[in-house]
Amino acid sequence: MAPTLVLIRHAEALHNKTNDPSILDPELSSLGIQQCEALRNELKEKFPKPVDVELIVVSPMRRTLQTASIALDWLISGGVEVEVDADWQEIYDKPCDTGSPLSDLEAEFPAFDFSIVDPVYPNKSSPEGRRYAHNRSAVLARAQTALGKLYGRPEKLIIVVSHSSFMRLAVSGTWFANADYRIFEFSERKSKDEPYRLTEWDSTRSNGGGMGLSSKDQVELGSGNLPPDAGSARLES
């Protein structure tokens, strides 16, 4: 049976506060840290025992790593396994959505193991990094890869800390406010060729997220401001 997924958007980061996309891999703002603490209280009440959550997956960007460090600290200290996965990074190629070198992250976040992160990270623009490119086919394919890796996991409950646009446009079709979360089950697949899709719990869907902070509107996967696939062809040429 496929695991239940708790998808979390990172708390407010400096680029969210200032609306400045030129900040490279920004850290959380002071409000973001407060949001993490509120999220921590909510999740700790909902999942009081580390045994309830069996895996945490985190995008290797500063704001997601910080969010996990603060909001999920009781789980991490309780021995819940953490995997840092580049497939859950944000979709854009702006500085704010471009990660830092893994060597820098290893020094800043010594509690996390970066050994299985794709070594091409944070490259998004070269032929080697084309699977992380900002175009429709690459983003949707990456989402399917990310979900496929979790679908076959033995754990019953997995928390993922990721980013708004990637989750909204490629994973769930739902909106995420900063430091809000939603809970999903994998939809039934009638054949191995069917895409991985998620069905949200009524409790978080009807409430506008677990914290009640997010829009209840839904969007079609692959819609929005995803560029056409021609960008991928240019990268491959």
Image: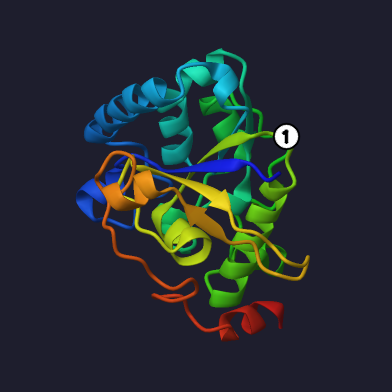
The reply to whether residue 216 is in sight is yes
User: For the residue marked with disc 1, what is the amino acid?
Assistant: Ser
Instruction: Identify the image quadrant of the C terminus.
Output: bottom right
175 horizontally vs 169: left or right: left
Residue at left 43%, top 31%? 66
Q: Is residue 236 left or right of residue 98?
A: right
- Whether residue 110 is visible here, answered yes or no, is no
Judge left or right: residue 132 versus residue 99: right
Q: Give the x, y percent position of residue 65.
A: 48, 34
Element type at marker 1?
loop
Quadrant in the rendering for residue 126? bottom right
**In the rendering, at what x and y percent does residue 175 appear?**
35, 57
Q: Residue at x 60, y 29 (%)?
A: 106
Give how far across and how far down residue 119 sits, in percent: 71, 47
Q: Give the camera-side residue of 191 and 147.
A: 191
Q: Quadrant of the N terminus?
A: top right
Q: Which residue is mark 1?
A: 115
Query: Vertical placement of 16 versus 172: above or below?
Result: above
Q: Position of residue 180 (x, y in %)?
A: 34, 42
State the residue lying farthest toward the top: 78
